[in-house]
Amino acid sequence: MPRLISASLDRFLSLLLLLFLLVYPFFLHPQVVAAALGLVPMNQIATLDFFYGARAQFLFWFVTLFLVIWSFRAFVAGSWGHRNKGMDLPLILFLWIALLSTLLAGDAKALFGETRRAEGFQSVFSYLALFFFGQDFLRQEYHRRWAIGIVIGSAILLAIYGIGQGLGWEFLPRDAIRAEWTMPFATLGNPIFLGSYLLLALPLPLYFIPHVKRGSKIALIAIVILFLVAIFLTGSRGAWFGLAVSVVALWLLQPNRVFRTILLAGTLVLILILLLVGTVRGVSFQDRLTDTSALQMRLYTWKMSLPAVWQKPFLGWGPDHFGNAFPQNAGSESMQVFGGIVYADKAHNDLLQVAVTTGLLGLVAYMFLIGRFFWLGFSRRRQDELLGVILPGLLGYWASLQLSFSVVSVAPFFWLLSGMSLARNGSSATA
């Protein structure tokens, strides 16, 4: 009887993760949905946080529910059923350092996060928990195929909606911040974040290509092209940089020379077409490539952030405390670079963000975590064909963070897919 119950709960927990992948990309503040349906006046939601705060709470309570059910399953079965894939130590180490940093910060922001960011310890804990969940409950081949299919389907909808936004068509309301934006952001809150999500999804259709007939192969290639077009339309140079990294990684990991040639040539042709088209709704791709103002802002932010690392070198200022650490509106140089008064709450570089908020100990632990994951993934790619497809997207996403930042609307997918990618490899020891 206990085995039957634990097996049923395992299936249920796997189903919960698949439902999470399906729902989370489209989760918005309930009042936004109500306004889209005409149930709430638009003027009541203009200053509302559409994308982040409610999502962070949904994420945390989903993780909490999952842990409660998993704990009951462990009680019934007499074990957690956890399989160490070589990632337990780096995950737990970074989690403990983030917790210590939160406790030393001693305020609610470290726990719940900055307003309209919501990446405090609560979200960090949820991200790392999702890695564990994906590793333990998305290890069956049919679960993995469903997960990949759901991400592809969600990305298709987001890409189409994003392209529609880029062309001036949408049905969801906008808040005051995004009222005049011309670049697409779909339901994720920012063009940068839409580009990041699509980077994760970009190579996934290739997983199915060897297993389907010719007509389906063409459809899958068309989906990849759709993702590429949407990524370019975001105008996010961070996403474009991540795309370059993904394409190079795919080219190196794919043994088929014909496929590698088509991949590289197709990407270059698409870039050429978009450059020739030039402008979509007033956004010039040439200008996005040559404009140096964003680079100047990044360089200034990075330069002014470094002293904050040395002020609290060990455990940092606390999760999502970059805004406290950064010297806001520091004189004429700041006004000149930003063009006005700006509140900087992110470093626009993932490694620097971690160093400021969790200190050098947190940075070392985080680099150990990321480095260990990619080392395991690349070293085991010959044992599992999924790794050769999913790793380039994960690597491209992480590369894009070095010019942007983690966000609660997209980061959970990186951590869950990362855990799933190692689910069929490594030690079979259980706890």
Image: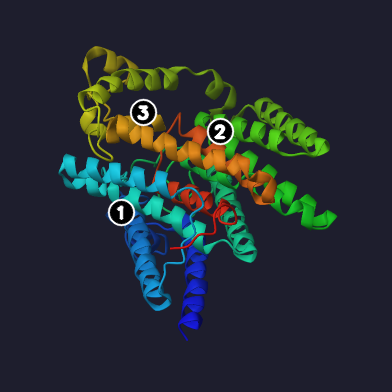
Vertical comparison of 327 with 192: above or below: above
Mark 1 closeness class: few <14, some 14–19, many ≥20 residues within 10 Å: some
The residue where tag 1 is placed is 45
Disc 3 element? helix
Q: Are the two marked residues, 2 and 1, in contact with CB atoms closer than 8 angstroms?
A: no
**For the residues marked 3 and 2, what is the alpha-carbon distance in whole angstroms?**
18 Å
Q: Earlier in the sequence, mark 2 or mark 1?
A: 1
Mark 3 closeness class: few <14, some 14–19, many ≥20 residues within 10 Å: many
Q: Give the number of the disc on residue 242.
A: 2
Of residues 325 and 358, the one nearer the viewer is 358
Disc 2 element? helix
Q: Position of residue 334 (x, y in %)?
A: 28, 17
Image point 51% across, 57% down: which residue? Answer: 135
Q: Earlier in the sequence, mark 3 or mark 2?
A: 2
Image point 50% across, 19% down: which residue? Answer: 291
Image point 53% across, 51% down: which residue? Answer: 417
Q: Earlier in the sequence, mark 3 or mark 1?
A: 1
- Point out the image quarter for the C terminus: bottom left
Q: Position of residue 398 (x, y in %)?
A: 50, 37
The residue where tag 3 is placed is 352
Q: Is residue 428 visible?
A: yes
Q: Is residue 47 visible?
A: no
**For the residues marked 3 and 1, what is the alpha-carbon distance in whole angstroms?**
34 Å
Vertical comparison of 175 with 405: above or below: below
